[in-house]
Image (cartoon, grey):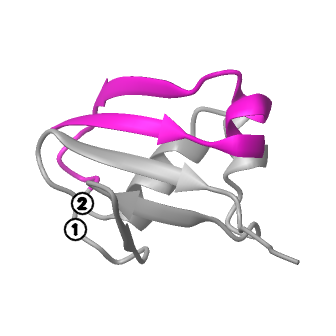
Amino acid sequence: MKLQLRFFASLREALGVSQEEITIPGTVKTIADLRMYLIERGNPWAEVLAESKVLRCALNQIMVDASTPLKENAEVAFFPPVTGG
């Protein structure tokens, strides 16, 4: 399955990439699976996307949770938590 990945704010800075097109194996079915797949790349991916870190995700520009199924040619965006004041 092909996906377009986008990384925003501090994630983009830490990874050194704002977007990437990837092809994932059939075993990667959800946002959570995708996150683990990316963590397996090693650092800086493992550090930036660690399960202990709170991240927000969007699928095709709609905010979703980790259990959301992926779709062919979807855009998946990762964001750090946003605070206001």
Q: Secondary structure at mark 2?
A: loop
Direction left: furthest residue: 72
Element type at mark 1: loop
Q: Which residue bears the numbered disc 2? A: 29
Provide residue 16's location: percent of width, then percent of height: 70, 21
Looking at the rendering, the stretch of residues picked out in magenta corresponds to: 1-28
Residue 29 can be seen in this image: yes
Q: Do labels 1 and 2 touch, CB within 8 Å?
A: yes
Look at mark 1 in the image and give the residue it sits on.
69
Near mark 1 (Cα within 10 A), the count class, few <14, some 14-19 or many ≥20, is some
Vertical side of 63 occupied by 3: above or below: above
> Type of residue at label 2?
Lys
Say which residue appears at 71% left-offset and 43% top-offset.
Answer: 9
Query: How far apart are the two marked residues, 1 and 2, measured between alpha carbons?
Result: 6 Å
Residue 17 shown in magenta: yes
Q: Nearer the viewer, residue 47 or 79?
A: 79
Amino acid at circle 1:
Pro
